[in-house]
Amino acid sequence: MTPAIINPPRVRGACPGALVPMEVADGLLVRLRIPGGRLTGPMTAAICDLAERHGNGLVDLSQRANLQLRGVRPETLSPLTDALRALGLVNGDPTAERVRNVLCSPTCGLDPACAPVRPLAVALDTALSNSPDLWTALPAKFSFVLNGGGQAPLADAVGDIRFDALPDTALFRVAVGGDQASATPLGVCAADVVVDTALALSRAYLRLSASRYRRLAALVAAEGAAGLAAHLSLAPLSVDASLPSLHLNQVLGAQAGWVGLAFPFGGLSVQRLAQIAHMTPVLRLTPWRALLLEGNFSGDPVDIFQPLGFILAPDDPRLALSACSGRGACDSGLTDARRDALALAQVAPRLLARGHIHVSACTKGCAHPAPALVTLTARDSQAGNPVYDIGLLAAAGGTAQWRGVTPARATSLVAALEAVYTDRRRQDEDPTAFVTRLGGPAELAAQVEAHAA
């Protein structure tokens, strides 16, 4: 048997992989990058068996559509890696693995309106694996997005380099440094040069950046995009570049060709995942905390999957929550962030219908670095019991209107905010506009306090 190539566990600040796992509180976190995001049922069942034998039986689906095995013990890492290599899920070199950050539309081949991007994603994954000049030069989080559009486009996925299929054409818009709306367009290319264009742009970034800019968006912001475009032979963006956006009602539940299942925070047990693996020939990983199960099912999918804890309704309030893995799973976590977040979903369905609530078990805000409608940030109290600071329209660790509140008090305050919003909002007014109209976070906090008294 070929010996496993295993480096010391990677610490925070970089992306883990299968060969270079990350050391966290509940053990080693092993991330599997699945080219094209497609797994057969038997392959998924085999992964579940390995996760149960070598880890703690929990798996996560990341926002890059990767599958993460949690709680792997150091003494079992080598046999786990050997088994993953036998399944064809591990590269031979850990530095090659780190650049394989390729996300493609999970509905490719299921949705006729989605451009055929999965073969391009697999080809790009292979090309990156065979480009040693990029392995250590590209930043660890440098990423590629291949958006086929159609029913479930990757509109919100952020990438350093992205290719967005232009509807009713055989062309892709080439853009850098953002999601579909914010990325800077460079031009248009045909499908047969997508892989070459991605590699050329990567190398152009390295030459122009000269290690001064950690991501492509920073390079463009500082120096513009003309230097990048000069390294490419792209057609001008002369066609209509209007691109569709994502609506989860076109992903979750029973769709034509698949059933979409989501789960809170992207985490589930291997027992639940194994149940799914035995019910479908193929499943697709998505960046939406959801799995797509290929094929049609006899009976109502709600009756089949909802009792197992899966989310099929796109308006389920739990989908508007973000929370980190928290205490016990992360050595920085002070609270059980996911438990506390689920308590908020029970008391604030109207806020969550139009806004986002984030619960962070420390000040770093890993699960949602941007501001949210309501953000709870855990910190130690003088009494030694973890408490939350709560900020409106704030990021984790930012300005807070309430400080040092217990989880129970935090739930009651959010419930009071829900009541004030329900009573005083204007028709179709979203929570962010509501906060602004009522005088901003500080003024609204006073009204919430009065209601909660």
Image (cartoon, rainbow, N blue to C red):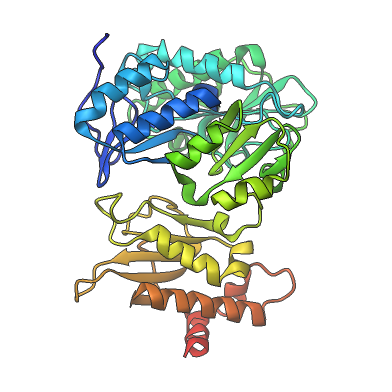
- In the image, taking residue 413 as reference, residue 84 lies left or right, namely left
Does residue 140 appear in the picture of this structure? Answer: no
Q: Position of residue 413 (x, y in %)?
A: 47, 78
Quadrant where the N terminus sits is top left
Q: Residue at x 39, y 20 (%)?
A: 207
Residue plotted at (49% across, 74% down): 414
- Left-right relation of 283 to 249: left
Image point (44%, 52%), residue name: 368
Snapshot quadrant of residue 422: bottom right
Say if 241 sits above or below 116 in the image.
below
Regarding residue 355, the answer to whether it shows in the image is yes
User: For this rendering, which residue is in front, 348 or 47?
Assistant: 47
Residue found 55% across the figure and 58% down from its top: 318
Q: Position of residue 396 (x, y in %)?
A: 39, 60
279 and 130: which is toward the camera: 279
Q: Is residue 431 above or below residue 299?
A: below
Please tell me in which quadrant of the rendered image residue 141 appears: top left
Front residue of this view, candidates 222 and 362? 362
User: How many numbered marks are there?
Assistant: 0
Camera-side residue of 62 and 224: 62
Residue 182 location, x and y as percent?
A: 58, 42
Name the spot of residue 289 as percent of width and height, x first. 53, 44
